Amino acid sequence: MVEIRLDGEKLLRCIKRIESELDVIRREAALGTATSPSVQGIDLTKIEWKGKDSVPAGAGDKWAWAFAYHEDGEYKEESKALVQAIEQTGEVTMDGYVMNLSGRDKGLLNRKKLK
């Protein structure tokens, strides 16, 4: 017989994360704003965000950009999951920001603070 074990703490964390995402969707729906897909498990602080004139951007800046790929066209490891999610959906909402790809060859990540 196969024994199935559940990690209660992990399950509760997943439920809380889902409830948090649903709260965001409900708030945006109440305001009549469209929602973009949201992803989990990406550390936005590992991405080298830049602001105007390529100055390093802070966590609270309203807008920032970063290179999505290396010069050889390979994904940057720290932003690979985010870029792939954006490539599939057009934009992603996460941690209070909406992110998309821009630039001539869609090689730049854009990060805008949600209003």
Image (cartoon, helix red, strand yellow):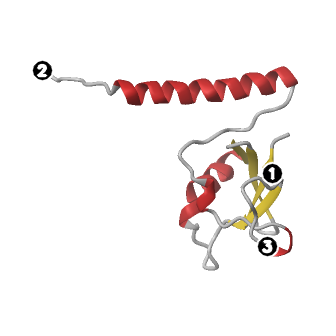
Residue positioned most to the bottom: 71
Tell me which residue sits at (65%, 39%) in the image.
Answer: 38
Residue 72, position as x, y percentages in the image: 60, 79
Tag 1 residue: 112
31 or 108, which is in the foreground?
Answer: 31
Under mark 3, the amino acid is Val
Tell me if mark 2 has few (under 14), some (14-19) or many (20+) residues whose alpha carbon lies within 10 angstroms of its own: few
**Residue 1 got which mark?**
2
Label 3 secondary element = loop
Residue 97, position as x, y percentages in the image: 75, 46
Q: CA distance from mark 2 to mark 3?
A: 60 Å
7 or 69, which is in the foreground?
Answer: 7
Which comes before the other along the chain, label 1 or label 2?
A: 2
Label 2 secondary element = loop
Tag 3 residue: 55
**Residue 39 got which mark?**
none
Under mark 1, the amino acid is Lys
Label 1 secondary element = strand
The reply, left or right, for residue 29 in relation to residue 75 is right
Under mark 2, the amino acid is Met
The reply, left or right, for residue 57 in relation to residue 77 is right
Between circles 1 and 3, the one closer to the viewer is 3
Residue 35, position as x, y percentages in the image: 76, 33
Residue positioned most to the left: 1
Indicate whether 27 appears above or below 64: above
Indicate whether 19 appears above or below 34: above
Between circles 2 and 3, the one closer to the viewer is 3
